[in-house]
Image (cartoon, rainbow, N blue to C red):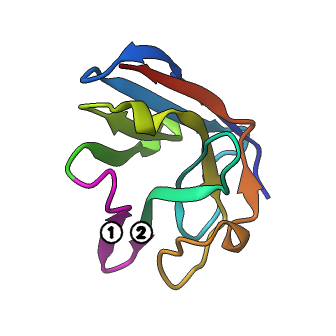
């Protein structure tokens, strides 16, 4: 497992943008998929976006609800994972969690398939 720390959440009006960051306490992210999940009050944690890097290249995957608005990226030099969120909607309001240590064969949208989690950062979108 690795320790993950998220930042960048906050309050924004609908249509606005935020960029979430996730850094690790170890030298690098662990092997396997890494990504972002979110959890709104009274709801289960849900998949937002993830990426998987292999020797053949990288793949990304997005939830249908955020496709075209959110972008996941990484900066290896800074050991950081990002989630750029544009055109935010009130229904995007949730606590956002960074996840790592996912499957080593590809991307999973199931939270239980990831073994490392950050503490979460609150994103609130007002209408």
- The residue at which mark 1 appears reads as 58
Name the residue that disc number 2 marks.
Answer: 53
At horizontal 34% and vertical 35% (from top left) the residue drawn is 84
Query: Marks 1 and 2: CB-CB under 8 Å?
Result: yes
Task: Give the mark nearest the N terminus, 1 or 2.
Answer: 2
Extreme residue in the bottom direction: 105
Q: Which residue is found at the position 62% from the left and 70% from the top?
A: 102
Q: Give the image location of residue 33, x and y in percent.
A: 53, 67
Q: What is the crowding at mark 2: few (fewer than 14 residues within 10 Å), some, or many (at least 20)? A: some
Disc 1 residue crowd, few under 14, some 14–19, many 20+, Cα 10 Å: few
Q: Nearer the viewer, residue 102 or 15?
A: 15
Horizontal relation, residue 97 to residue 106: left or right: right
> Residue at (37%, 24%) from the top-left corner?
18
Segment colored magenta: 53-67
State the SS at label 1: strand
Quadrant holding the C terminus: top left
Residue 39 shown left or right of residue 71 in the figure: right
Residue at the image point whose x is 34% and y is 32% from the top: 89
Q: Secondary structure at mark 2?
A: strand
Q: Position of residue 104 (x, y in %)?
A: 57, 80
């Amino acid at each position: 497992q690795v320790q993950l720390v998220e930042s960048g959440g906050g309050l924004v009006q609908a249509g606005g943008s935020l960029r979430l960051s996730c850094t690790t306490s170890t030298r690098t992210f662990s092997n396997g998929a890494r990504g972002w999940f979110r959890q709104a009050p009274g709801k289960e944690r849900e998949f937002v976006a993830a990426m998987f890097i292999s020797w053949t290249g990288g793949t990304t995957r997005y939830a249908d609800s955020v496709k075209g608005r959110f972008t996941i990226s990484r900066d290896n030099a800074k050991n950081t994972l990002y989630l750029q969120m544009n055109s935010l909607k009130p229904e995007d309001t949730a606590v956002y969690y960074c996840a790592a240590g996912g499957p080593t064969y590809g991307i999973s949208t199931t939270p239980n398939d990831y073994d490392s989690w950050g503490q979460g950062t609150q994103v609130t979108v007002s209408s």
